[in-house]
Image: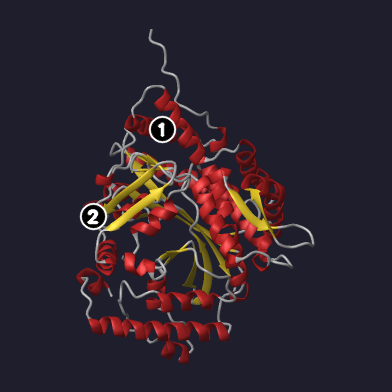
């Protein structure tokens, strides 16, 4: 497999063999499910955060290789572009004071990484999209020096056959083109993993899809790209357009994009893996030597390497994941909705809200997905990306009359969803101190109608009103964001605007 990645050359026989292997992998997954071979409940969660490297001026620094050498920890890895890093936190069991422990681990890890970056005159910023990024920063020559990124770029570019078009119409409009997938690197996210049994997978995935718009509304943190103020959470349209293998003709035919919300509620994890094979051609047709069905016949556990690889090139906002730990297969729901930042407290609050809410909704006797069309969940996601904390969302009406109603996101969260999240966290065994602290952060954001995106936009406009040019205002906003991020105080407490200059003398 490694030789293929380095060579990057695929012929027709590679693609046919890969398609055949994918079908055998899918059959293998079906057998594993039927034979109930999957891990029993362990209440395990995991966390990944993508990060930006910036200089003292707030501009991106293309130094991830050098910074990673100094960090010298397997917890930190490269991401798509040279100004990106990713930190991975080992799986934790949900319960007790787990969120406080996670917060402390993250503070320690990020403070250490920030010090190491500082040795190279750089620093780490957790933010959905770095406001100071320029189009010249997001070119193929700035992709990380890793074979898989180069190969993925080459295959997506070849599949599309023409330049990528970015067209996002928000507060302002951005239109431009790119010859590579590099603009995707602007999107820095938090990924929340939850290990689930096959029997619970569909309920958890459906619940996660139902609340994706709510997650964005309270957690939006990406209002700027290439000097333009766009959507409150601009990552989803940017991600979709910068990885879109469909030329306009295929878009017009209704061919599905590889970055996808989905189109239906599901009844099994199998549904999602099967859809990925049915709808999406292979980008990286790399085969290993394992025959998954022979492994199963011999009583072993197949790696399903081709299925895992293919699944990783379909960018669902809630992605199914197949993995093996200690020789036992398991399934996870990977929630990819949230932007990075603003602070560790905010990240953990977003996580606590998600894990509590998904647990409660997945166990309701009349689940939300039986009372709301899937199209409404997709529309909520879009509305929340556009409007952030000011979004209006569609949600099932309470009481016996049924139907749906349009409601302010903040009212929905405060009146209905925070109590559910609290009940869900209690069901996980989370101690009340953690529940109160982190759900209190979400409640305060709603009370003040303030999140990372609203703070960035308000501070940028305040800087312009003070006489700064657009670029200077974006730079000053980014530097101020970095200062406040390092204090660790949640974003709803941040003062809007730039600090007054200290008097001379």
Q: Quadrant of residue 201?
A: bottom right
Marks 1 and 2 close (CB-CB < 8 Å): no
Where is residue 501 shown, x and y percent of the image? 41, 18
Q: Residue placed at 61% from the left, 63% from the top?
A: 207
Compared with residue 365, is residue 12 higher up or lower down, i.e. above or below?
below
Total numbered labels placed on residues in the image? 2
Q: Quadrant of residue 195?
A: bottom right
Q: Residue placed at 41% from the left, 75% from the top?
A: 279
In the image, taking residue 487 as reference, residue 156 lies left or right, namely left
In the image, taking residue 91 as reference, residue 73 lies left or right, namely left
In the image, taking residue 338 as reference, residue 17 lies left or right, namely left
Where is residue 312 shown, x and y percent of the image? 40, 68
Which labelled disc corresponds to residue 477? 1
Q: Where is mark 2, residue-wise?
A: 140
Farthest residue toward the top? Answer: 505
Viewer-nearest residue: 97 or 56: 56
Circle 1 packing at 10 Å, graded few (<14), some (14-19), many (20+), is many
């Amino acid at each position: 497999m490694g030789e293929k990645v380095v060579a990057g050359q695929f012929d027709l026989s590679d693609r046919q063999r890969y398609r055949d292997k994918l079908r055998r992998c899918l059959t293998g997954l079906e057998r594993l499910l039927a034979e109930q071979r999957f891990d029993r409940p362990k209440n395990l969660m995991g966390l990944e955060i993508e990060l930006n490297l910036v200089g003292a001026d707030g501009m991106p620094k293309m130094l991830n290789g050098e910074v990673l050498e100094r960090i010298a920890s397997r917890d930190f890895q490269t991401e798509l572009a040279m100004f990106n890093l990713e930190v991975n936190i080992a799986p934790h069991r949900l319960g007790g004071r787990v969120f406080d422990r996670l917060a402390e681990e993250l503070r320690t890890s990020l403070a250490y990484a920030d010090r190491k970056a500082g040795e190279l005159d750089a620093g780490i910023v957790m933010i959905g999209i770095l406001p100071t990024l320029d189009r010249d920063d997001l070119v193929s020559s700035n992709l990380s020096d890793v074979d898989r990124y180069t190969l993925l770029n080459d295959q997506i570019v070849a599949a599309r056959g023409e330049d990528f078009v970015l067209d996002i119409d928000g507060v302002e409009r951005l239109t431009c083109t790119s010859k590579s997938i590099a603009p995707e690197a602007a999107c820095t996210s938090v990924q929340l993993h939850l290990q689930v049994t096959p029997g619970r997978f569909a309920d958890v995935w459906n619940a996660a899809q139902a609340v994706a718009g709510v997650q964005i509304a309270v957690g939006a943190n990406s209002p700027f790209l290439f000097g333009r103020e766009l959507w409150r959470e601009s990552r989803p349209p940017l991600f979709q357009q910068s990885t879109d293998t469909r030329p306009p003709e295929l878009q017009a035919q209704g061919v599905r994009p590889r970055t996808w919300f989905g189109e239906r509620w599901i009844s099994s994890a199998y549904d999602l893996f099967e859809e990925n094979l049915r709808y999406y051609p292979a980008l990286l047709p790399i085969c290993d030597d394992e025959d998954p069905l022979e492994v199963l016949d011999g009583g072993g556990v197949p790696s399903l390497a081709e299925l895992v690889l293919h699944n990783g090139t379909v960018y669902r906002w809630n992605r199914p994941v197949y993995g093996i730990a200690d020789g036992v297969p398991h399934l996870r729901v990977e929630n990819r909705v949230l932007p990075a930042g603003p602070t560790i407290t905010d990240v953990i609050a977003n996580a606590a809200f998600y894990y509590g809410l998904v647990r409660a909704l997945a166990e309701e006797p009349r689940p939300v997905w039986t009372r709301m069309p899937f199209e409404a969940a997709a529309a909520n996601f879009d509305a929340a990306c556009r409007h952030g904390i000011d979004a209006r969302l569609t949600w099932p009406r309470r009481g016996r009359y049924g139907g749906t109603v349009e409601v302010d996101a903040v009212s929905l969260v405060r009146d209905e969803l925070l109590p559910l999240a609290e009940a869900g966290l209690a069901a996980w065994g989370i101690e009340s101190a953690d529940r109160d602290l982190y759900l209190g952060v979400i409640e305060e954001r709603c009370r003040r109608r303030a999140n990372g995106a609203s703070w960035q936009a308000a501070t940028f406009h305040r800087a312009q009103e003070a006489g700064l040019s657009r670029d200077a205002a974006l730079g000053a906003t980014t530097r101020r964001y970095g200062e406040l991020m390092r204090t660790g105080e949640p974003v709803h407490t941040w003062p809007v605007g730039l600090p007054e200059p200290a008097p001379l003398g």
